[in-house]
Image (cartoon, grey):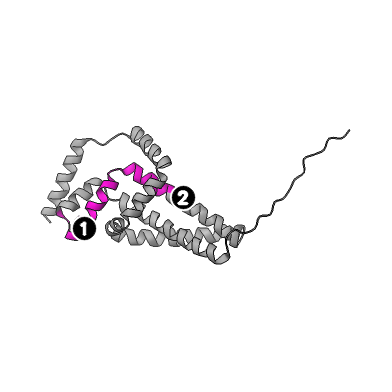
Amino acid sequence: MTKSRPSLKLIVTRRDLPVWATIIFIILLLTLSGLFSGLNLGLMSLTPHDLIVIQEAGTPNDRIYAKKIYPVRKRGNFLLCTILLGNVLVNTTTTILLDTLISGLLAVIGATLAIVIFGEIIPQAVCSRHGLKIGAKTIILTYFFMIITSPIAFPLSKALDFVLGKKKKFSDIFFIKKNISTLIFR
């Protein structure tokens, strides 16, 4: 009696999306990657204190933008986890989809170049100059992604809050007064 070895089977799957739909989906994913990357720089570089100062002493438009962003930004770790989870999700999905069009090393190289240029460099350059406005104009999308990612992002943010602790209120008040006085005396 001989033992039979398990056979190795190669399963070939067919492409689920037509090429044109895959390309459109990749473009959409790169756009979302750029949004996440830009929001990471644009929103996370503004502290809640900065937003309070802008609400008090900024231009009329900047005051409106800061008021829209403040409720999201004051939940910093939750916002950070949401942005990073979203960015990783769309970037890995982009690579997987590109692999269905051009496989192997070319897909990895193509995805890397596309993500770096269109998902990182260009959005961060734009958001470093217009982060407040872009953050305010896309706040609904930010809330949407906070809801979608909340099963993972919220517990992670609470763990970060616990590990890193909260800021002291005295330093917050001092920081705000210092920034307002700096703006007044310019």
Q: Which residues are magenta?
A: 57-85
Q: Secondary structure at mark 1?
A: helix
Under mark 1, the amino acid is Asp
The tally of labels here is 2
Q: Quadrant of residue 159?
A: top left
Residue for point 65% across, 58% down: 14
Left or right of 111, for residue 37: left
Q: Quadrant of the C terminus?
A: bottom left
Under mark 2, the amino acid is Val
Check whether the beta carbons of the residues at disc 2 and disc 1 lie within 8 A of each other: no
Residue 41 position within the rendered picture, expressed as x and y whole percent measured from the top left: 34, 53
- Residue 169 drawn in magenta: no
Q: Nearer the viewer, residue 129 or 43?
A: 43
Residue under circle 2? 88
Residue 105 position within the rendered picture, expressed as x and y whole percent measured from the top left: 60, 58
Residue under circle 1? 62
Q: Nearer the viewer, residue 36 or 46?
A: 36
Mark 2 to mark 1: distance in Å? 30 Å
